[in-house]
Image (cartoon, rainbow, N blue to C red):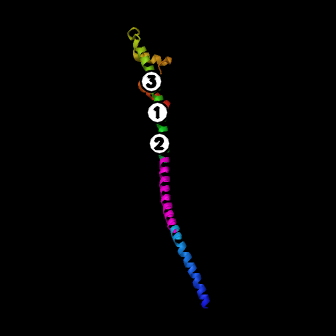
Amino acid sequence: ERAAKENLQKVLQDIEREIRQRYPVLMSQNQELKELRAQNAEMKEQNRIIYQKAREYATYNRDAEARAQRAEHAYTIADLHAHDLTKQLAILLHDKNRWSNASLAASRATFFQMTKAAEEEGEWPLSSVQDVVQQNVALRK
């Protein structure tokens, strides 16, 4: 029994010596593991924030692109509208000059009669600027 105790004591001392030799390494690994877990948690949080910002920027970018397309479309429509108005005003000015150059006194016709005659002949379909504007609005619809 004494030999068994001594043998057991020797085994326990060998185990204790082994533990003491490996303890610093194990503690170092344990500390490193804790640090890596903390870094992992910090990186996960940073990734979450970055991902959230990336989604916000993507949404902002899509909205900006949509606004730019709408602005370009509005510019095109405004440009076409201005071009149409320019043509209509040119026609109005041309016809006004043509009518004002006509000798109203010689023909003894009033402007109303001349306009009515022009409408009947299909030369002057619009009687006022308001008609031109209404026609332009109707063409846009």
Residue position marked by numbered label 3 in the rendering: 86
The x and y percentages for residue 29 are 53, 67
Name the front one of labels 1 and 3. 1
Q: Mark 1, residues whose alpha carbon is within 10 Å: few (<14), some, or many (≥20)?
A: few
Give the farthest residue toward the left.
105
Identify the residue at horizontal 47%, vertical 49% (top origin): 56
Q: CA distance from mark 1 to mark 3?
A: 16 Å
Left or right? Give the position of 93 relative to 3: left
- Eyeballing the image, is 60 above or below 11? above
Amino acid found under the numbered disc labelled 1: Tyr
In the rendered image, residue 43 lying in the magenta stretch gets the answer yes
Q: CA distance from mark 2 to mark 1?
A: 16 Å
Give residue 64's mark: 2
Q: Mark 3, residues whose alpha carbon is within 10 Å: few (<14), some, or many (≥20)?
A: few
Of residues 51 and 134, the one drawn nearer to the viewer in this rendering:
51
Amino acid found under the numbered disc labelled 3: Thr
Identify the residue at horizontal 55%, vertical 78% (top origin): 16
The x and y percentages for residue 34 are 50, 66
- Eyeballing the image, is 76 above or below 48? above
**How many callouts does the rendering have?**
3
Q: Which residues are magenta?
A: 30-58
In the rendered image, residue 37 lying in the magenta stretch gets the answer yes
Asked which secondary structure carries label 3, the reply is: helix
Residue position marked by numbered label 1 in the rendering: 75
Give the farthest residue toward the top.
106
Q: Tell me whether the residue at label 2 lies in contact with that at label 1, contact meaning CB atoms closer than 8 angstroms.
A: no
Quadrant position of the N terminus in the picture? bottom right
Give the farthest residue toward the bottom.
1
Q: Is residue 17 visible?
A: yes
Q: CA distance from mark 3 to mark 2?
A: 32 Å
Asked which secondary structure carries label 1, the reply is: helix
Marks 3 and 2, the one that precedes in the sequence? 2
